[in-house]
Image: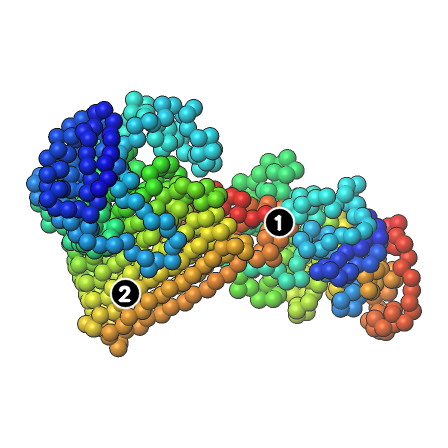
Amino acid sequence: MLKIDDLHVRVAGKEILKGLSLEVAAGEVHAIMGPNGAGKSTLGNVLAGREGYEVTAGTIEYRGRDLLALEPEERAAEGVFLAFQYPVEIPGVNNTYFLRAALNAQRRHRGEPELDSMQFLKKVREKLAVLHLKDELLHRAVNEGFSGGEKKRNEIFQLALLEPRLAILDETDSGLDIDALRMVADGVNAMRDPGRAFLVVTHYQRLLEYIVPDVVHVLADGRIVESGDKSLALKLEEHGYAWIAGRHAPAPEGAGAAG
Amino acid sequence: MATQTPTAIEIERTREPNGNAAVEAALNRRYEAGFVTDIESESLPPGLDEGVVRAISARKNEPEWMTEWRLAAFRHWLTMTPPHWAKLEIDPIDFQAISYFSQPKNRPKSLDEVDPKLLETYDKLGVPLHERARLAGVAVDAVFDSVSVGTTFRKELAAAGVIFCSISEAVREHPELVRKYLGSVVPTGDNYFAALNSAVFSDGSFVFVPRGVRCPMELSTYFRINARDTGQFERTLLIAEEGASVSYLEGCTAPMRDENQLHAAVVELVALDDASIKYSTVQNWYPGDENGVGGIYNFVTKRGDCRGARSKISWTQVETGSAITWKYPSCVLRGDDSVGEFNSVALTHHRQQADTGTKMIHIGRNTKSKIVSKGISAGRGQNTYRGLVKVEKGADGARNHTQCDSLLIGKKCGAHTFPYIEVKNPGAIVEHEATTSKISEDQLFYCRSRGIGEEDAVSMIVDGFCKQVFKELPMEFAVEAKKLLEVSLEGAVG
């Protein structure tokens, strides 16, 4: 589904990703772990197409297409979803309105018929029930005045509603208490599907107890320096990132079980 | 001393720009004579003097008192100078280069002759086909018959006792009402542009809602007969007697192309005891092009007089057009417990400049006012909020709340806020909140990452910003105002 090859990215003149390679197949959950400043968030932003992230070398192939050639909204319509580390507030814009506009824009792009209010509302109710969210969330402005936890849950709600093929979760666990974390994990697990892949970016192993990954990658200094199964996350938890740095492991090209 | 050689049907005229009374007087007679032919051509040559004022009055078959009223205003105007205090860059206006009574002679004969760009805009706004022709100034009287529509409404209104007609008609049919109220809120010498308007106003609306009557429908210039060619000097007078209520919508929501440069309207509202007036405007005059060429200079004086106790006047405006906007819809809160409101969205794009806001004058006891101003600047647009909250000595228990928000799109635009507060009563409570924000890259990227294209994202964010004001508009107006912002903001990003 996703094939990143030797990706180099600069942000504000500074090279952040320095030859990152990664392959993710449909149906898999990959975790990306790593210390602060390793380039984890950069990876998510580049995949979603944020401005200011200059790709100086390398390629990203998504479902056989050059992802970098697509605008952010085209990527979304093609099934790429980024759950933000810091979801953005849009004052005065109703959450339901926003979501319907987003879903219908994507459907238009794909040549699918748009959903009318009734159809949309039905879908919304289904997803709310699965995520145990309150109706009230719908009537508020997008993320405005939401608590940190509510914002993250809203991201997962969007994820559930937009049903992307590739979901990137950028430190969705940060700032969540244990109940919220479990809820987010439940939401993600409910969405696991042979046709869908997840890239879970996180600092801590904690989230991976709930969202069990197929592959764990360690990102350090702009490269994937180690890949393994879920036990790698536990090792990291035990020894810390210094342990990886100490091993100085060269990045295995095209790492990952998907191969 | 300027001499002009008008076309064959117009009598040669000489103009004394400084208004030398003797010369004027001598010329006036010739003008009156000269006007007969002008009626046929339905326009006066450029220039302004007493003769022109008389000619306009004569053209409208006005009674003597009305002519004198205009002349008094004109004489006052001659002693005045244009205001320079607004934060606007304006080239000096040559008032002698303007025709004060013009109905375009070379109207396009069909839609084929109309600027395709304009038609495209109508299309986006979903303006019905026959309306498009009318708005573009095409002579389509045969096609678009507003008379029948107007008549239907008129019958219903008349049954309720509501008078709704053009101001010209009111001067003839209801002189006692017009004489009583005209200029009672905005005196002829109030300011430079109000004086000019008083002298030369071409037409406008007159509304009278008698005691205890709740107007059975929203009144709108859109539905009024004769509204088609209201000139650039409209005069609107709206009176709600004791306990009456009315909602008035002004301005067509579709873009009006106007080749004339100057637009100076006056609107006067009078609310007696327990009356309430809601006045909504969507202004979308031609804003000029990307480089600031052309466009309307919009100098408007709007004032509401809450003359009676417990009366309420509420202004809501959405200003997206005009090269220059100079406009401060105000409330004089004279009656005890009266309420004034001002809700505004002003957008400036490209080279547009707006200096707009309101004045709330608290005179009566327990008077309340609320101001919500939303300014949006894009391109090289300059947007200024200028507001006065004044609490007079006797206004015990007066309260005001002002909220003033600015939104910037891009790096070359500007937002400015000049709130003036004058309080002479120590018990008054006056609150002012102001924010300035930018449409952030974060917000745009967030929307786009969910599949919403850049322009849609911008209009969504702007719409959210304006929501508080839009909800004050009647439903259909709110929808169109939103569309209008979308169209006006096209090309604002990227």
Identity of the amino acid at label 1? Arg
A152 sits to left or right of B213: right
Indicate which disc, 1 or 2, sits on the residue closer to the N terminus: 2
- Taking the spot 53% from the left edge, 47% from the top edge, the residue there is B492
Q: Could you say where residue A60 lies in the image, as x and y percent from the top left?
A: 79, 48
Q: Is residue B395 above or below residue A89?
A: below
Nearer the observer, B200 or A110: B200
- Taking the spot 53% from the left edge, 40% from the top edge, the residue there is A116
Which chain letter goes with mark 2?
A: B
Q: Could you say where residue B313 lies in the image, as x and y percent from the top left?
A: 26, 56
Q: Could you say where residue A111 lies in the image, as x and y percent from the top left?
A: 64, 35
CA separation in Å, label 1 and label 2: 43 Å
The residue under label 2 is B368
Question: Mark 1–mark 2 contact, CB under 8 Å?
Answer: no
Instruction: Report helix, strand or loop for mark 1.
Output: helix
Which chain letter goes with mark 1?
A: B
A20 sits to left or right of B243: right
Question: Looking at the image, can residue B374 be seen?
Answer: yes
B322 sits to left or right of B494: left
Q: Could you say where residue A1 lies in the image, as x and y percent from the top left?
A: 79, 46
Identity of the amino acid at label 2? Lys
- Taking the spot 91% from the left edge, 57% from the top edge, the residue there is A252
Q: Is residue A188 above or below residue B164?
A: below
Q: Is residue B133 above or below residue A171?
A: above
The residue under label 1 is B448
